[in-house]
């Protein structure tokens, strides 16, 4: 994921531009995923989790037109392709991320995600946005989500991921990136999506998924651990958070009635 700051768009070399560019370069190196083999191994593991957690919410039909904004190095593009979707395109402002995605022949293009979704001629049926809105200002995040809603047809789907500030460990994902600007609770994210016109909003935590033996045992431990943590919170006089994981997903749809 890369978001261009207004300073970068204007071509200025100021402190904001420097810290963003330095961090993105460091992040790419620190991942260690710089060859096709390591990328595919990582993406295969993520795809198994995505399939279990998000599969029931995906639109049917291999011809569904998807865009991934921004696509980063291609992890969600890879997942969508693995599910058989043929009309998939990702956009990212960072040419290095696009280059990595193309190493696996993924359909990634270099372009700022906000410019893509503001194109009124764009016609898509589903939009993915993984780890993006927290990099925008609040005003820009609202405008981005509103533009997503406007580009989707009635019944279109938006799937996004963002850090979750609900639980006691929420600061880990919220502030583990130098370029994050804010973090949302699950209630706020739901309100934000409804505010710009989405409906049927589902907020999903990142609970373990039983795609392998380790995931199965972790999932079995998840439920009693969550119950114990909730009881502990209540004993302290605190309402247990709806989402305990450090990040969350939202699945939202546009109204079937375009006038809604």
Image (cartoon, rainbow, N blue to C red):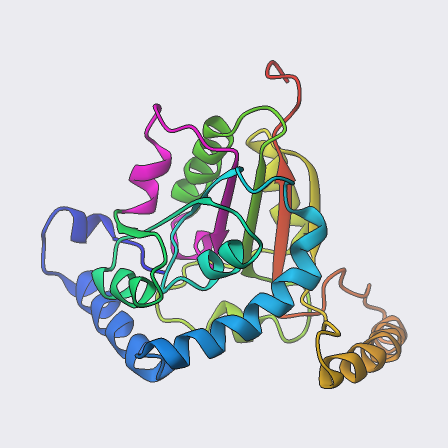
Is 15 part of what is drawn in magenta? no
**Residue 119 percent coordinates (x, y):** 32, 29
Q: Indicate whether 120 appears above or below 141.
A: above
| Residue under the point 63% across and 29% down | 155
**Residue interval drawn in magenta:** 112-137
Quadrant housing the C terminus: top right
Q: Indicate whether 129 appears above or below 147.
A: below
| Residue under the point 65% across and 40% down | 60
Q: Is residue 164 left or right of residue 18?
A: right
| Residue under the point 81% across and 67% down | 238
Quadrant housing the N terminus: bottom left
Q: In terms of depth relative to the viewer, which is nearer, 249 or 139?
A: 249
**Residue 19 percent coordinates (x, y):** 23, 69
Is 119 part of what is drawn in magenta? yes
**Residue 180 percent coordinates (x, y):** 41, 63
Q: In terms of depth relative to the viewer, which is nearer, 131 or 95?
A: 95
Residue at the far left in the pictured view = 12
Q: In terms of depth relative to the viewer, which is nearer, 122 or 203?
A: 122
**Residue 226 percent coordinates (x, y):** 83, 74
Which quarter of the figure has residue 244? bottom right
Q: In terms of depth relative to the viewer, which is nearer, 212 or 163?
A: 212
Q: Is residue 242 left or right of residue 132?
A: right
| Residue under the point 37% across and 61% down | 72
């Amino acid at each position: 994921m890369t978001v261009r700051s207004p300073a970068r768009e204007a071509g200025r070399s100021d402190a904001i531009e420097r810290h963003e560019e330095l961090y993105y370069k460091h992040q790419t190196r620190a991942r260690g995923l710089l060859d096709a083999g390591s990328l595919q191994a990582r993406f295969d593991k993520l795809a198994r989790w995505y399939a279990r957690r998000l599969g029931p919410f995906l639109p049917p039909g291999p011809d569904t037109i998807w865009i991934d904004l921004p696509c980063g190095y291609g992890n969600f593009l890879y997942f969508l392709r693995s599910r058989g979707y043929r009309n998939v395109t990702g956009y990212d402002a960072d040419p290095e991320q696009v280059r990595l995605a193309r190493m696996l022949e993924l359909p990634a293009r270099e372009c700022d995600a906000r410019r893509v979704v503001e194109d009124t001629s764009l016609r898509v049926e589903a939009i993915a946005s993984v780890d993006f809105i927290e990099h925008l200002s609040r005003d820009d995040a609202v405008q981005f989500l509103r533009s997503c809603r406007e580009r989707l047809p009635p019944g279109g789907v938006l799937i996004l991921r963002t850090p979750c500030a609900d639980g006691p460990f929420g600061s880990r994902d919220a502030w583990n990136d130098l370029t994050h600007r804010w973090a949302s609770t699950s209630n706020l994210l739901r309100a934000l999506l409804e505010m710009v016109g989405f409906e049927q909003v589902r907020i999903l935590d990142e609970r373990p998924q039983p795609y392998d033996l380790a995931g199965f045992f972790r999932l079995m431990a998840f439920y009693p651990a969550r119950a114990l943590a909730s009881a502990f919170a209540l004993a302290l006089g605190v309402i247990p958070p709806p989402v305990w994981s450090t990040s969350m997903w939202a699945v939202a749809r546009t109204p079937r009635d375009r006038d809604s």
